[in-house]
Image: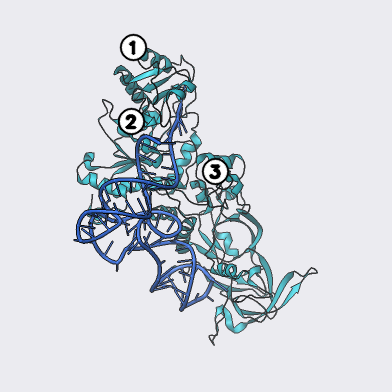
RNA sequence: UGGGAAGUCGCCAAGUGGUUAAGGCUCUGGUUUUUGGUGCCGGCAUCGGGGGUUCGAAUCCCUCCUUCCCAGCCA
């Protein structure tokens, strides 16, 4: 531990525990070892970012190491696709486990030996109760369970049967290996928990080598012990399992005793986080796969245009504690905006175009203005923007009947076209149905660049795109997937709360030509519209689609709402 | 109703007997601004309730209340 660490007070209860352990000399080799242990049965989501940042962060802060361990003990649910996506996601966040990539399945041999030893010591037995009988004999939350009639089977018989289980001589569900602990324990996890069950399933890594698979409560603590994990951090729902964890690490012959600590999992309002629900959204085709930009998966987040830095900042800000909490979605958005504001390249893109014609500007003339890529960066590069007589501006930036406080374009009101000129609307052109098709205006040639010699001020500045020099692009506007704070709260079915407007497709937005120089991975800001990025999935298919990552804060929209406009 | 855990501002979250009870987000005034963005300045809690211990309690004790988790051969 270096001075930097000692100087800083622990920022959460886990850091305090670690510092106390370190100070008391309770940590072997003074090296703390953590692990991130996903089951490869789905894609990682934002909740995992909290766990990843915690485990890798703690190891980093205290000079220890963090293992990546796949908890692959249920072959029916686990797939290679998930193993690979998990690695990709952790790396994207900027963490690396070095050579410490492990699999619980690597320990099947050792686990099996330990199980045999338990049987020999009379601490485990083969049970032939059916699933239903087992359930009945387990008792209830308030009543003790009863011992299985097979509990006192001779050791030799247990040994023989367990070996037969391993050899595949018994069908699935016919028998299990159980620990002998205490059927009367008030803690259900201690009522002779299952250690091994039979599954004739093909395992992603061990193939058909095994047909008996160890359970979580047996595998996890022993895997931790094998890897010399010092602090095994998991979520709150495992608090009840801690006695089982301790039971396993106290088995004879296991000389390393990791400790389990629990923290509250991440919940965010307007989001669903459970794998089951996310898988459902994918299967029902409600979203475009696990990496749909509206999904809370890390791959979705990445495709949406959220930066890894902003995600890490987010989980750092929410803290780590033991009280169940629901973080406000607005904090997530804040973190994304804060990071993107510093690094996004600014571009002018008109999402809802309406034509603006400058009557006193020469027809056919093209003039170029210099636009700053990022005003937050004093050394920012610049690029050129073409200006012509006919432009597109946002329909919202012109009003025939301007509400109080509106200082954008309306007849007679002079405003600035960013980087270009001051213009004053003079008339509107309408079609037969009364819709505005074009706005006519005049410009002041003396305001070139957006300022005038007399220093007169204008209240509004609009972005614009040249009608002839700009390009058409497709834009996808994403919003929250759910419109209620706690999806499903009202009806019990979270699908009832799907936001019908979570995706709005704009097939022909108008963008300045500079957009052709953007690539997947670039962070962009469409001035006054929000942060955007080039969609990676469509780009791979040769199609240019821009995703809205997050909108800009919009105090005018808020004001309009307050005024009831 | 058995066991395990949690309750500090609208949302997170520091705080571990003596502080004006940190900080962030949200909200909200103002200011700056060639993005109604950003930045900057300001506002916003007496700690689930009730007792008690103490010169002094969010912090200790008692009691009550509320919420969450546990009865997979899932993790």
Instruction: Look at chain A in the picture and name its colour.
Output: cyan
Residue at figure coordinates x 61%, y 83% from the top left:
A445
Callouts 3 and 2 on one subunit? yes
Residue A28 falls in image quadrant: top left
On the image, the x and y values in percent for residue B28 come to 49, 70
Element type at mark 2: helix
The subunit carrying tag 3 is: A
Element type at mark 3: loop
Alpha carbon distance from label 1 to label 2 = 25 Å
Give the label, 1 or 2, closer to the camera. Answer: 1
Foreground: A156 or A58?
A156
Residue labelled with disc 3: A290
Give the label, 1 or 3, closer to the camera. Answer: 1
The subunit carrying tag 2 is: A
Sequence-wise first label, 3 or 2: 2
Alpha carbon distance from label 1 to label 3 = 50 Å
Residue at figure coordinates x 43%, y 45% from the top left:
A48
Callouts 1 and 2 on one subunit? yes
Residue at figure coordinates x 55%, y 40% from the top left:
A279
* Mark 3 nearby-residue class (10 Å; few <14, some 14–19, many ≥20): many
Give the label, 3 or 2, closer to the camera. Answer: 2
In the rendered structure, find residue A222 and report the number of the disc placed on it. Answer: 2
On the image, the x and y values in percent for residue A483 come to 58, 53
The subunit carrying tag 1 is: A
* Mark 2 nearby-residue class (10 Å; few <14, some 14–19, many ≥20): many
On the image, the x and y values in percent for residue A247 come to 31, 30
In the rendered view, tell whether residue B43 sits above or below residue A20: below
Residue reaching furthest to the right: A432
Element type at mark 1: helix
Alpha carbon distance from label 3 to label 2 = 32 Å
In the rendered structure, find residue A156 and report the number of the disc placed on it. Answer: 1
């Amino acid at each position: 531990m270096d001075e930097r660490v000692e100087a800083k007070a622990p920022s959460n209860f886990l850091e305090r525990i670690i510092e106390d352990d370190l100070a008391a000399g309770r940590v072997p080799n003074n090296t703390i070892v953590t692990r991130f242990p996903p089951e490869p049965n789905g894609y990682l989501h934002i909740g995992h970012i909290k766990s990843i940042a915690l485990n890798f962060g703690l190891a980093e802060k205290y000079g220890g190491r963090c293992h990546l361990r796949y908890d692959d003990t249920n072959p029916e649910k686990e797939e290679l696709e998930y193993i690979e996506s998990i690695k990709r996601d952790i790396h994207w966040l900027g963490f690396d486990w070095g050579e410490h990539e492990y699999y619980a399945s690597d320990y099947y041999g050792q686990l099996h030996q330990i199980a045999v030893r338990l049987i020999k010591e009379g601490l485990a037995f083969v049970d032939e109760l059916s699933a239903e009988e087992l359930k009945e004999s387990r008792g209830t939350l308030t009543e003790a369970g009863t011992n299985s009639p097979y509990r006192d089977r001779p050791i030799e018989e247990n040994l023989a049967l367990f070996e037969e289980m391993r050899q595949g001589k018994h069908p699935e569900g016919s028998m299990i290996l159980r620990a002998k602990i205490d059927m009367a324990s008030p803690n259900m996890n201690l009522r002779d928990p299952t250690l091994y069950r039979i599954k004739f399933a093909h395992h992603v890594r061990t193939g058909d080598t095994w047909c008996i698979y160890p359970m979580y409560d047996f595998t996890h603590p022993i895997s931790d012990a094998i890897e010399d994990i010092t602090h095994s951090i998991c979520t709150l729902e495992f608090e009840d399992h801690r006695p089982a964890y301790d039971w396993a690490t106290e088995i004879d012959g296991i000389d390393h005793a990791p400790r389990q600590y629990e923290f509250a999992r991440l919940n965010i309002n307007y989001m669903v986080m459970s794998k089951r629900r996310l898988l459902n959204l994918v299967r029902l085709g409600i979203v475009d796969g696990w990496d749909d930009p509206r999904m809370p998966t890390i791959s979705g987040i990445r495709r949406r245009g959220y930066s890894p830095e902003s995600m890490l900042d987010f989980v750092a800000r929410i803290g780590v504690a033991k009280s169940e909490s629901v973080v406000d979605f607005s904090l997530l958005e804040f973190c994304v905006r804060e990071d993107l504001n510093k690094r996004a390249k600014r571009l002018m893109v008109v999402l809802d175009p309406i034509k603006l014609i400058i009557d006193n500007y020469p027809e056919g003339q093209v003039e170029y203005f210099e636009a700053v890529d990022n005003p937050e960066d004093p050394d920012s590069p610049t690029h050129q923007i073409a200006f012509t007589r006919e432009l597109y501006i946002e329909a919202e930036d012109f009003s025939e009947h301007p509400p109080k406080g509106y200082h954008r374009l309306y007849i007679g009101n002079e405003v600035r076209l960013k980087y270009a000129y001051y213009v004053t609307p003079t008339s509107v052109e309408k079609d037969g149905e009364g819709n505005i098709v074009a706005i006519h205006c005049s410009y002041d040639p003396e305001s070139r660049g957006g300022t005038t010699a007399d220093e007169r001020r204008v209240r509004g500045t609009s972005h614009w795109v040249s009608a002839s020099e700009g390009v058409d692009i497709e834009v996808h506007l994403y919003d929250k997937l759910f419109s209620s704070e706690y999806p499903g709260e009202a009806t019990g079915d979270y699908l009832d709360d799907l936001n019908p407007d979570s995706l709005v497709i704009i097939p022909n937005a108008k963008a300045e030509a500079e957009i052709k120089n953007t690539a997947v991975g670039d962070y962009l800001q469409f001035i006054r519209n929000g942060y955007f990025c080039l969609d990676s999935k469509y780009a791979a298919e040769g199609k240019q689609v821009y995703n809205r990552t997050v909108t800009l804060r919009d105090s005018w929209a808020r004001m309009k709402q307050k005024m009831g406009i």
